Amino acid sequence: MNSDSDLQIAGDILAVQHLLQPAREHPATVAEFVGLARSLAEDRAQWEHLVRYDATTRWYHRLRTGPGYEVWLLSWVPGQGSGRHDHGPSSGVLTVLDGELTEHSARGPLTLRAGAQRVFAPGYAHDVVNDSLDGAVSLHVYFPGLTEMPMHHCTPAEGAAHRESVGVPAA
Ligand SMILES: [Fe+2]
């Protein structure tokens, strides 16, 4: 038997580490971005101590950046909402870390509890609001990183509020 045959090498892949693809340092596919969000959600030490609640303005914190993506941490006091917006050319993964959020989109309202994940493509529009009586925390992965977040203004009053938040992650 020829011990150098490809078949034999392929039969024991762990014996030939040099043939394995190295693990990617950064996520690059939708599945990998979802996986990144899920692993961060489960590793509370990565974000729990950073969370602040601010009743006067939306609180957000850029948790991580990498080539072609950004990860943001957001908090929501009861009643706070993003306003209706899309994400420009970015796709995203929204993961609820704590509490409960309600997402309003063309398909109607959707209650998102801790652990829930939503994946959206460029151009997807939604309004995220904390309709509960407790604070909520969410994690947002955008790929590519967020360059714009066009607000879909409804009334002049809402438009003024939205303009203040343009340039920061609404949701
Ligand atoms: Fe959003």
Image (spheres, helix red, strand yellow):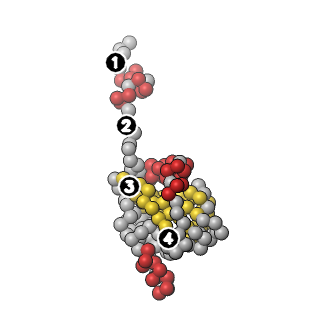
Element type where label 4 sits in the image: loop
Lower position in the chain sequence, tag 4 or tag 2: 2
Lower position in the chain sequence, tag 1 or tag 4: 1
Q: Amino acid at mark 1?
A: Asp
Where is residue 99? Give x, y as percent: 61, 61
**How far is mark 1 from mark 2, CA to CA?**
23 Å
**How far is mark 1 from mark 4, CA to CA?**
62 Å
Residue at which label 4 appears: 58
Residue at which label 3 appears: 65
Lower position in the chain sequence, tag 2 or tag 3: 2
Instruction: Between label 1 and label 2, give the one nearer the viewer.
Output: 2
Instruction: Between label 4 and label 2, give the one nearer the viewer.
Output: 4
Element type where label 1 sits in the image: loop
- Label pair 1/4, CB-CB below 8 angstroms: no
Lower position in the chain sequence, tag 3 or tag 1: 1
Mark 4 crowd level (few <14, some 14–19, many ≥20, 10 Å Cα): many
Where is residue 69? Give x, y as percent: 38, 56
Mark identifier at residue 22: 2
- Ligand 1 closer than 8 Å to label 3 CB: no
